[in-house]
């Protein structure tokens, strides 16, 4: 696990009245892969050079990488450009989130952010770019924004017209087809003590399968399958969660089941959604804030309010994409 800090351009969303959706024209779709990246971002860099142009990203394994190993740093020669501390945070406050400013307040002597040059290294397979361009002129929101139609594999709205389309882009961004990963989480108390909970997780993205068709997705109404099993501590080991995420959640809401080792029974779990406390989280996170946001967007109103440059701390987590 490696922490980096980067400058990035961000899309903001807030709670307001939703906007109606409309498909984009062939003329606008033609911008994808030209003045826009194939997924709809601005291809050019910004005026001051702090955000470079996108040139296709990393498309080949980094030198020294073999399948199954932790991903090596693709830019090992990068140097720290500057460091933000409690002493100079005011100089960068326009580029920091309220949460980051709070961390400087809580830990004035120890919290800092080392800032490196921005890298636009993201890329996805060509078939995802092709599907995204096809989605651009046919995808639409359905069920009052609680589902989508006419999209597969790629993001549905590469040139989003409103916040609902943008959040569906997040939900359906490409993450591979099958993923196996281990996750650790802790709920710290005020004095810093905690109990580590470890889980083994598997995801199969039906939506992202390269051979999937629109007809198959509509018939199955399935975006992905998710399985989570607690492996540590011993008192919770074996507790499990199974989820089937649907494409039209108005027609069929998320389907979920849990296995409780104490009861030794599988139970249907319709409450595994929205603001229900997340699995073994001591109530410190909700189900829908995992992965920034997941699930039905129906309890929120979303607005696309523009772009702003932020300084982010991101964590690179190694996982194995099995296909």
Image: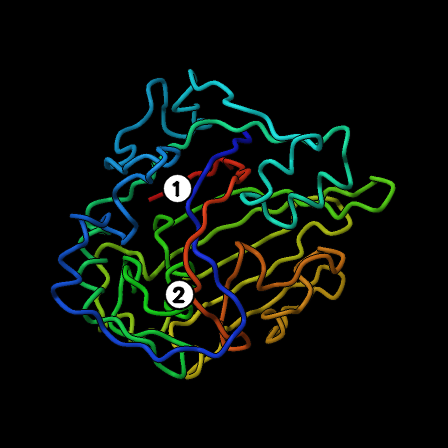
Q: Residue at x 19, y 48 (%)?
A: 35
User: How much space separates mark 2 and mark 1, taking CA atoms?
Assistant: 22 Å
Q: Secondary structure at mark 2?
A: helix
Question: Looking at the rendered structure, which numbered label has been put on residue 168?
Answer: 2
Mark 2 burial class by Cα count in 10 Å: few <14, some 14-19, many 20+: many
- What is the quadrant of the C terminus in the image? top left
Q: Nearer the viewer, residue 180 or 278?
A: 278
Position of 44 relative to 117 (above/below): below
**Mark number displayed over residue 321:** 1
Q: Which of the two marks, 2 or 1, is nearer to us in this view?
A: 2
When the figure is inspected, residue 154 is found, relative to residue 184, above or below; the finding is below
Which quarter of the rendering shows the N terminus?
top right
Does residue 123 appear left or right of residue 189 in this picture? Answer: left
- Front one among 63 and 97: 97
Where's residue 192, x and y in %? Answer: 83, 39
Task: Tell me the residue at 53%/40% (across/down).
Answer: 312
Q: Residue 275 falls in which quadrant of the image?
A: bottom right
Q: Residue at x 32, y 65 (%)?
A: 160
* Residue plotted at (40% across, 22% down): 75
Does 311 sit above or below residue 132? above
Side of 74 relative to 23 (left or right): right
In the rendered view, how is the structure colored? rainbow
Residue 211, quarter of the rendered image: bottom left
Residue 15, labelled with which disc?
none
Badge 1 density bin: few <14, some 14–19, many ≥20, Cα 10 Å: some
Residue 44 drawn at (x, y percent): 26, 41
Give percent across and percent down for residue 20: 35, 80
Is label 2 in contact with label 1 (beta carbons under 8 Å)? no
Q: Is residue 281 above or below residue 118?
A: below
x and y percentages locating residue 302 in the rendered image: 47, 71
């Amino acid at each position: 696990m490696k922490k980096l800090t980067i400058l990035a351009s961000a899309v903001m969303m807030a709670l307001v009245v939703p906007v109606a959706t409309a498909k984009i024209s062939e003329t606008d779709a033609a911008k994808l892969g030209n003045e826009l990246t194939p997924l709809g971002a601005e291809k050019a860099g910004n005026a001051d050079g702090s955000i470079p142009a996108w040139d296709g990203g990393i498309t080949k394994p980094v030198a020294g990488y073999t399948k199954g190993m932790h991903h090596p740093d693709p830019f090992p020669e990068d140097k720290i450009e500057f460091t933000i501390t409690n002493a100079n945070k005011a100089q960068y406050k326009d580029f920091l989130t309220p949460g980051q400013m709070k961390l400087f307040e809580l830990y004035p002597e120890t919290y800092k952010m080392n800032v490196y040059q921005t890298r636009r290294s993201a890329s996805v397979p060509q078939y995802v770019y092709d599907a995204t361009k096809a989605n651009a002129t046919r995808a639409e929101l359905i069920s009052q924004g609680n589902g989508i139609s006419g999209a597969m594999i790629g993001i549905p709205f590469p040139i989003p017209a409103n916040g609902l389309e943008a959040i569906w882009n997040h939900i359906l961004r490409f993450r591979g087809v099958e993923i196996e990963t281990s996750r650790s989480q802790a709920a710290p108390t005020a004095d810093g003590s905690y109990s580590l909970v470890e889980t083994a997780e598997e995801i199969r993205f039906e939506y992202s399968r390269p051979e999937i068709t629109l007809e198959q997705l509509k018939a199955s109404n399935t975006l992905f399958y998710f399985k989570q099993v607690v492996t540590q501590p011993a008192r919770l080991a074996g507790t499990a969660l199974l989820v089937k995420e649907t494409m039209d959640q108005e027609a069929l809401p998320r389907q979920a089941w849990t296995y409780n080792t104490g009861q030794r029974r599988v139970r249907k779990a319709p409450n595994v959604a929205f603001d229900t406390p997340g699995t073994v989280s001591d109530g410190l996170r909700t189900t829908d804030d995992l992965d920034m946001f997941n699930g039905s967007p129906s309890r929120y109103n979303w607005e696309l309010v523009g772009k702003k440059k932020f300084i982010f701390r991101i964590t690179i987590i190694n996982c194995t994409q099995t296909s």
